Image (cartoon, rainbow, N blue to C red):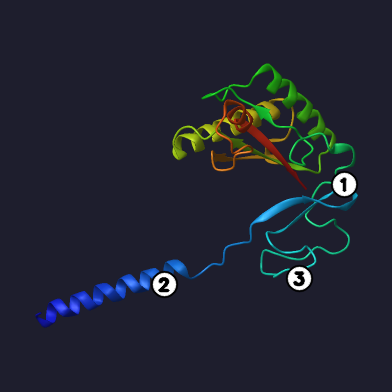
Amino acid sequence: MPPIRHHRLASAIALVLILAVAACGGKKRPPALTATPGEGGTTSSAPVGTSPAQPLDEGPDVRALGDDYPAGSDIPYGDYAMGTEGGPLTDIHFAYDSANLTDEGRSTLEKHALWLQSHRDVRLTIEGHCDERGTVEYNLALGEQRARVARDYVVSLGVAPERVRTVSYGKERPLDPAATEEAWARNRRAHFVVTR
């Protein structure tokens, strides 16, 4: 093999190794969180496979909560435990391949708007979700439409727009992983996450 070719091959291999090391190194992924019922009607979020008593690996964006706050809980449940999945606001559901609000969805959003107006210290994230059918890209777009239509309706009812943000998870976070009509209907939803 001529020396120039050998040099190019060695350079190409070195470049591939550098890129591979750069892609694998760098930022550490955050631990996965699971919500588990805690004492006193609160939820506790802890990294999977660890106990809540394990010391927290603090960093620039992470700090341990003192005893002033329940672990992993932003909003006390108490009178607010109206929703599913541990939140104070219930999900709304959509028809297949649709981002149109149903009458039931509008009624639910009207109750949410009243609750938000009486709790002005909270912020709301509306998550758009889809069932498993369709491409990832299509479902991300549809999930975004669902979250936005819910946001727009809540804002039209008097909730300040800066308090509400949207995110789409498409088909990536199903509530029910079964491949049945009932499961798909449960997964076509807007979910409401309340934080301070």
The first of marks 3 and 2 along the sequence is 2
Asked if disc 2 and disc 1 are in contact, CB closer than 8 Å, the reply is no
Residue most toward the top?
A: 103
**Amino acid carrying mark 2 in the image:** Val
Residue 21's disc number: 2
Label 3: how many Cα within 10 Å (few below 14, some 14–19, many 20+): few
- Classify mark 2: helix, strand or loop: helix
What residue is drawn where x is 72% and y is 35%? 160
Frontmost residue, 185 versus 24: 185
What residue is drawn where x is 85% and y is 34%? 118
Q: Is residue 70 above or below residue 141?
A: below
Q: Is residue 143 above or below residue 32?
A: above
Residue 41's disc number: 1
Q: Quadrant of residue 157?
A: top right
The first of marks 3 and 1 along the sequence is 1
Q: Which residue does the numbered mark 3 point to in the structure image?
A: 55
- Classify mark 1: helix, strand or loop: helix
| Quadrant (top left, top right, bottom left, bottom right) of the N terminus | bottom left
Label 1: how many Cα within 10 Å (few below 14, some 14–19, many 20+): some
Residue 123's disc number: none
What residue is drawn where x is 74% and y is 32%? 90
Label 2: how many Cα within 10 Å (few below 14, some 14–19, many 20+): few
The first of marks 2 and 1 along the sequence is 2
Percent x, y of residue 29: 57, 63
Closer mark to the observer between disc 2 and disc 1: 1
**Amino acid carrying mark 1 in the image:** Gly
